């Protein structure tokens, strides 16, 4: 591996956020899934949990340009809600849902510097009640138009860039926050 490649990998790993993840529940469109993956990579989110309880099993995701991000992120697949959130809660202390509700905080009122997983639901139905029971809170993206929600990949991107902003202000980027073993595993696997 040449020095330029090593420097790039170290830069990426030094900006990964080991205490921030995304959960996608029953997201149907493969393009949305891989657009989310691309955004996760861009802001340093390593783990994406894909929970699929309503869609046909073995659905193949992604032959598009954004599918290339899947090499740099870790995708965990589940077809059982309880199993998915058991795995999520082993690593992440809080789970917050993007959920249209008057009691939800805006993304600007939400502390994204915590150890947390962010849940985004299906393009049409949103998040199921079963998944909502596993969540510690809800957030919304403020909007003033007629359509009450954004496309799932756009909503995720807006939210993750607010998380990036908050985390940069707290100095959570630029120095590795991973344990050394995990850091070296990614470095070796990504060569």
Image (cartoon, grey):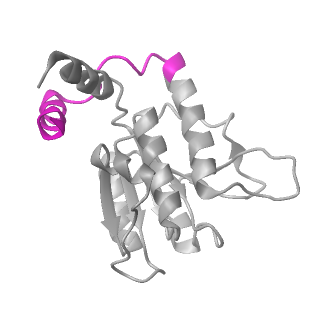
Q: Position of residue 67 (x, y in %)?
A: 39, 53
Q: Position of residue 84 (x, y in %)?
A: 36, 65
Q: In the visual, does 178 lie left or right of 135?
A: left
Where residue 34 appears, as percent x and y from the top left, is 45, 55
* Picture mark count: 0
| 63 horizontally vs 145: left or right | left
Q: Is residue 135 left or right of residue 69?
A: right
Image quarter (top left, top right, bottom left or bottom right) of the C terminus: top left
Q: Identify which residue, 150 or 168, lies in the foreground.
A: 150
- Residue name at image x 40 percent, y 39 percent: 41
Between residues 104 and 183, which one lies in front from this camera angle?
A: 183
- Residue 150: in magenta span: no
Instruction: Look at 40% across and 62% down and name the residue there.
Output: 62
Q: Which residue: 48% across, 42% down?
A: 39
Q: Is residue 18 left or right of residue 25?
A: left
**Residue 116 in view:** no
Establish if 131 lies above or below 151.
below
Q: Which residues are magenta?
A: 168-191
- Quarter location, residue 77: bottom left
Residue 30 at what x, y percent from top left? 47, 65
Residue 151 showing in the rendered view: yes
Instruction: Tell me where residue 123 sits by quadrant.
Output: bottom right
The stretch drawn in magenta includes residue 182: yes
Q: Give the vertical position of 88 relative to 82 (above or below).
A: above
User: Which quarter of the rendering shows the N terminus?
Assistant: top left
Residue 122 higher or lower than 158, as above or below: below
Asked where in the image residue 75 lies, by quadrant, the reply is: bottom left
């Amino acid at each position: 591996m040449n020095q330029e490649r090593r420097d790039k990998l170290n830069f990426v790993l030094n900006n990964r956020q080991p205490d921030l993840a995304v959960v996608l529940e029953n997201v149907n469109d493969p393009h949305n899934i891989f657009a989310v993956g691309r955004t996760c990579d861009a802001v340093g989110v390593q783990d994406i949990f894909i929970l699929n309880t309503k869609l046909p099993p073995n659905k193949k995701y992604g032959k598009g340009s954004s599918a290339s991000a899947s090499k740099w992120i870790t995708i965990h697949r589940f077809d059982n809600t309880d199993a998915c959130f058991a795995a999520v809660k082993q690593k992440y202390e809080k789970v917050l849902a993007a959920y249209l509700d008057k009691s939800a905080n805006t993304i600007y009122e939400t502390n994204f510097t915590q150890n947390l997983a962010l849940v985004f639901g299906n393009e049409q139905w949103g998040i199921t009640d079963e998944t909502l029971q596993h969540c510690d809170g809800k957030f919304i993206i403020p909007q003033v138009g007629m359509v009450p929600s954004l496309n799932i990949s756009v909503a995720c991107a807006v939210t993750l860039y607010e998380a990036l902003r908050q985390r940069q202000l707290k100095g959570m980027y630029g120095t590795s926050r991973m344990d050394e073993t995990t850091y070296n595993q990614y470095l070796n696997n990504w060569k």
